[in-house]
Image (cartoon, grey):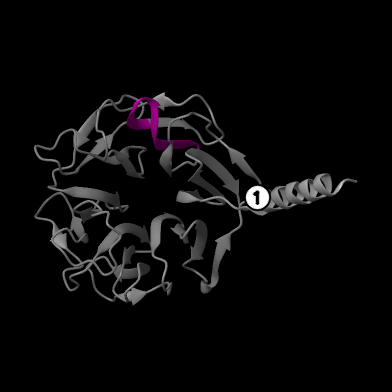
Amino acid sequence: MQPKLFFAFIALSVCFTVSAQQKGYYRTPCIYQNTIVFTAEGDLWKYDMTTGITARLTTHAGVETDPSISPDGKEIVFSGQYEGITELYEMSINGSVPRRITYDFDFWSIHACSWTKDGKIVYRTEKYSQLPSPQLMRLDPVTLDKEPIPLWQASDGCYDDAGILYFTRFPNQGSKTKRYKGGFIEQVWKFDGKQEAKCLTADFDGTSTSPMIYNNRIYFLTDRDGTMNIWSMDKDGKDLKQQTFSSGWDIQSPSISDSKIVYQKGADIWLYDIKTQPANMYMIVVK
């Protein structure tokens, strides 16, 4: 073999090896039982924790992101760009033709936050706000009827079984500044629909966001120890406990199903099981 051809062959072999070993950049995961849906390469993917099989769900040139799985595990709602501007779409968790379910023409902030027990979608939008500020809405994905949740600047939230909403006030300020304590700090609030909302994290002047509910406790993200970690408190904002102890990389985009929380850390997806505490906290290896 000629020297030039030999070195070209070696170079190609190295390139193929690096390509085969290269991992993806995995973002915005959500979970239902043993199924995780996440964003990579601008598309949605489904990962089965039981079999270890990953399947691509979308291939559109636009971005599909921020999935959320229905309470029965059959449907996904997500932000998509199928018709140019980002809107909410719904499709089967096994993949299907996406169905557009919003017509808000909201350029930046539209985002599905959670589902109610009766199958309504809680999402945020600036469509119905008088200022460039988020508004939470409840949407029936069957009839497309929607109603505003009467809260000013609420940007994320979920309901417990008693119909009480735990929500984040103010949108994510977006700079990723460590230990941000400016005028747009997010805080977790409680709203029963009968009286004024109550701030549950007023004891800390930094960020507290992304509330999730399990076993009568609120799990949420906060940077009280200098890095975004998962903490928990009771439904009155008491009995504060730190659940994860990441350092350096912030935890982002958490999603809960029963006792399991998936989240993004760096470019990877991690799983934390509340029942087993740190003994079952590990990185999801997507194949």
Nearest to the observer: residue 31 or residue 213: 31
The image quadrant that residue 176 belongs to is bottom left
The image quadrant that residue 182 belongs to is bottom left
Q: Is residue 201 left or right of residue 161?
A: left
Pinpoint residue 89: horizontal percent, then vertical percent: 39, 30
Is residue 206 within the magenta segment? no
Q: Is residue 276 left or right of residue 169?
A: right
Q: Give above or below for 103 relative to 272.
A: above
Q: Residue, x 31% and y 57% (percent of image)? A: 210
Q: Main secondary structure of the magenta part?
A: strand
Q: Residue, x 13% and y 37% (percent of image)? A: 129
Pinpoint residue 193: horizontal percent, then vertical percent: 15, 49
Nearest to the observer: residue 9 or residue 252: 9
Q: Which residue is mark 1?
A: 287
Q: Is residue 168 left or right of residue 23?
A: left
Is residue 85 within the magenta segment? yes
Q: Residue, x 76% and y 49% (percent of image)? A: 13
Q: Find the residue positioned furthest to the right.
A: 1
Q: Give above or below for 132 relative to 216.
A: above
Q: Give above or below for 104 relative to 193.
A: above
Q: Is residue 220 left or right of residue 95?
A: left
Q: Residue, x 62% and y 52% (percent of image)? A: 22
Pinpoint residue 122: horizontal percent, then vertical percent: 29, 41
Q: Magenta segment, which residues?
A: 74-88
Disc 1 residue crowd, few under 14, some 14–19, many 20+, Cα 10 Å:
few
Amino acid type for the residue under numbered disc 1 = Lys
Label 1: which secondary element: loop
Pinpoint residue 85: horizontal percent, then vertical percent: 32, 28
